[in-house]
Amino acid sequence: MRTKSIRAFLLAVAGHLVPCRSHPLSVAHCQGPRLTASTGLHRTPCTYNAAPALPTHTAMNIVINQDLKAYIDPLTPEEHEALERSLLAEGCRDALVLWGDVLVDGHNRYGICQKHGLPFQTVQNTRFQSMQDVHLWMIDQHLGRRSVSDFQRGVLALRKREIVAERRAAALAASSPSQTPAGHAAHNEHDATSNAEPSAPVTQPPPTDPLSSREAIARAARLSSSQVVMIEKIRKQAAPEVVAAVKSGTISINAAAAVASLPAEEQVAAAMAGKDELKQAAKRVREAQRKPRAEPVVSAGEPAPDTVAALQQRIAELTAENAALRQQVAELSARQ
């Protein structure tokens, strides 16, 4: 009887074993599930051909920078629920990226792991030298993700262009010769001396901005040039309520760009009224922007051709009515 109980226990435990991903034909290299008093089955990592373990961090030594957390649009509730289910089923497999103690990538995973007490690993990116480096890295990471919407990819590509342009301007300013009085004096002394030594070579300017054209931005964001133009307009002119609507997918980029042409008050009113009103507002803007039919040029004091024709037709109608009335009067007079 005791043998049967032990056998049933072993079969129950074996039912929870899963093949090792690194060595799928064997489970000999995996520790497999382990029974604990508090959590029941606890899966430990495979040790077959494993890379060195990454450090595991706790909430005490990870800093959340709210600006970095908000730099990328948050997940939708549906996307967050799907990520939570995945982490609960498979664990946090991708390491969180840190810059020192600052969390750079993995804010959603970090929050879910903290909520459910799930273990996670971290990795340091030692190439970051400034916050601009962090921003550019985050942008490149999200531009390659399929879950990012067209609008968000366009916004990220435009942000990258701005950062690269700032860096180029700073590099050009740093490479320009000094304009201090001492520099001018040295320059004049050099001109006055005929046998002076040649000056040091001028530092070459930084390479051309890879996102200097709208076409380059479109390629980086996997969009059309016209979409980039519309996203630029939305960023500059759209009310926050309209931006929120296009981010959520309530209206298209095209419709949001059209609504952005309206005064801010009308934009907010349309957004508060809902999806249908936003579409109607966009339709009205498009119709108003259509080129009106060219009107014939008429000199001052001269009636328009359409007016002359209408007057002539009216005169003919009145003449006919007058003739009919005269005939009726003649008929009445004859009867008397």
Image (cartoon, helix red, strand yellow):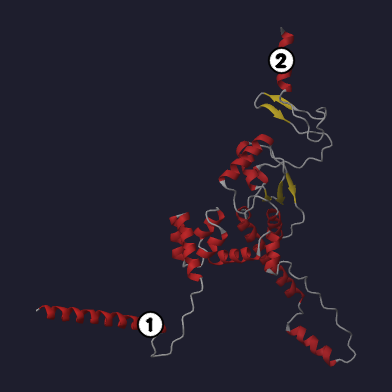
User: Which of the pair 151/325 is nearer the observer?
Assistant: 325
Q: For mark 2, what is the residue?
A: 8
Q: Is residue 156 left or right of residue 336?
A: right
User: What quarter of the picture does the N terminus occupy?
Assistant: top right
Q: For mark 1, what is the residue?
A: 309
Q: Is residue 318 left or right of residue 36?
A: left
Q: Is residue 69 left or right of residue 324?
A: right
Q: Is residue 287 left or right of residue 8?
A: left
Q: Residue furthest left?
A: 336
Please identify the quarter of the rendering in which residue 136 is found: bottom right
Residue 48 marker: none
Residue at x 72% of width, y 10% of height: 4
What's the residue type where badge 1 is placed?
Ala
Residue at x 83% of width, y 92% of height: 192
What's the residue type where badge 2 is placed?
Ala
Element on which disc 1 rests: helix
* Residue 304, x across and y down, in percent: 40, 84
* Residue 207, x across and y down, in percent: 78, 70
- Mark 2 residue crowding within 10 angstroms, few (<14) / some (14–19) / many (20+): few
Q: Mark 2 and mark 1: span between their CA atoms? A: 104 Å
Seen in the picture, residue 176 relative to 220 is either above or below; the reply is below
Residue at x 66% of width, y 66% of height: 162
Please identify the quarter of the rendering in which residue 116 is found: top right
* Residue 79, x across and y down, in percent: 60, 45
Seen in the picture, residue 44 relative to 191 is either above or below; the reply is above
- Mark 1 residue crowding within 10 angstroms, few (<14) / some (14–19) / many (20+): few
Discs 2/1, front: 1
Seen in the picture, residue 10 relative to 98 is either above or below; the reply is above
